[in-house]
Image (tube, grey):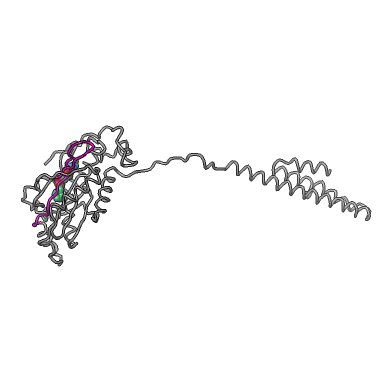
Amino acid sequence: MREEALAAIQGAATLDALGGVKTRYLGKNGLVTAQLKTLGSLAPDERRARGAEINALKAELEGAVAEREATLRQEALNAKLASEAIDVTLPGVKLPSGGLHVVTRILYELSDIFESMGYRVVEGREVEDETHNFDALNMPSWHPARDLQDTFWLENGQLLRTHTSNMQVRYMETHEPPLKIVVPGRVYRYEATDATHESMFHQFEGLVVGEGITMADLKGAISEMARAMFGRGARVRFQPSYYPFTEPGADFAIWWDQEQRWLELGGSGMVHPNVFRAVDDLRAAKGLPRVYEGKTGFAFGLGPNRIAMLRYGIPDIRYFYGNDLRFLTQFKGDLSNETPSELPPLPRDTLKETM
Ligand code: FA5
């Protein structure tokens, strides 16, 4: 029986099988237990010798079961570890991720450039009132220049800002000179859309106010931006232009060395004295001191969409806001060496009537 039992224990391939063997020999009705029960019928001397023998066998079998159990448990654990092992050298699963919009990237880039020149980046509201979008910018309601920027009016008499210049007024209204700010943001115009015009687009405004600020400072700032944005070979050209809130006003273009051509980027000029006067009036109404009379400053406003279109060869402004992933996902990587490889079809024409 000893030989048989030991062989059965060694031969048990699983914990379950081992449990069966254990019950068969050592259980309440097991074979070894049955032997113990026969002791009562033996003579005392014989009983002692036989009892010692059976108990020794019982102890040996229990030991063998325990040992086999430990071995089987270890084997089971090893198997489990092997089956659940993670091969950390395998390549990971790529999850889809979003990216910054190409216009956002340009705005960040511009903001960085001007921050490095000591400008503060300010953002402002898109729902605006007539005072800050027009009146205080030397464009009273009768002013013909208002027709240049067709406006989305809201039912409550407010409007969607037609340019980021509203923030010139808002910022000066609550801050004293000297100041240097840039304002990235969305603007809206009620106009027919085409390859270069959207009814919602982005602008990037700049405003510097202090003592003795001149047109040379304006040219310096724009030139510095152009060099940072388009390389050391970039040059800037100013041409006289008219904006009610500047005197004199000038449009500026950048010489794009790589493409060997001028790129019309935006408008600029020296802040019109009437703007300073209007801001002081707004401040006075708030109980703030008049601090802008007699100050000098320059302002500019440019179109970041323009920069993106020229830099990446994007032929139509409507791609920017069409939310077509085939377009958007082309601008996820490194800014410096991207060109869209394949352009998806444009959304259906969104031509609107101009009032
Ligand atoms: C203005 O909006 C002035 N506020 C700029 C300014 C600021 C002048 C400070 C002087 C001092 P303008 O309407 O020209 O100006 O627009 C400026 C730029 O916005 C344009 O050069 C062009 O790049 C861009 N832009 C204008 N209209 C659209 C449009 N419908 N779609 C896309 N970009 C446009």
Q: Nearer the viewer, residue 164 or 334?
A: 334
Q: Residue at the location (15% across, 65% down)?
A: 286
Residue drawn at x 22%, y 48% is: 225
Q: Residue at x 87, y 53 (%)?
A: 52
Horizontally, is 161 left or right of 339 in the view?
left
Give the answer, above or below, for where 282 lies relative to 321.
below
Considering only vertical position in the picture, is 208 above or below 98?
Answer: below
Asked whether 257 falls inside the magenta stretch, the response is: yes
Task: Find the magenta span and give its range.
Answer: 252-274
The percent coordinates of residue 78 (x first, y second) are 63, 44
In which quadrant is the C terminus drawn?
top left
Query: Magenta residues: mostly which secondary structure?
Result: strand
Q: Nearer the viewer, residue 276 or 248?
A: 248
Q: Nearer the viewer, residue 275 or 337?
A: 337
Residue 86, image quadrant: top right
Residue 153 can be seen, yes or no: no
Q: Quadrant of the N terminus?
A: top right
Point 74% across, 48% down: residue:
67
| Quarter of the displayed picture in which ligand 1 can be seen | top left
Q: Is residue 213 visible?
A: yes
- Residue 28 image point, x, y percent: 78, 50
Label tally: 0
Q: Is residue 76 magenta?
A: no
Identify the residue at the far front of this view. 233
The percent position of residue 34, horizontal first and vertical second, equals: 83, 48
Vertical arrangement, residue 45 with respect to residue 340, above or below:
below
Where does residue 310 sit, x and y in percent of width and height? 23, 38
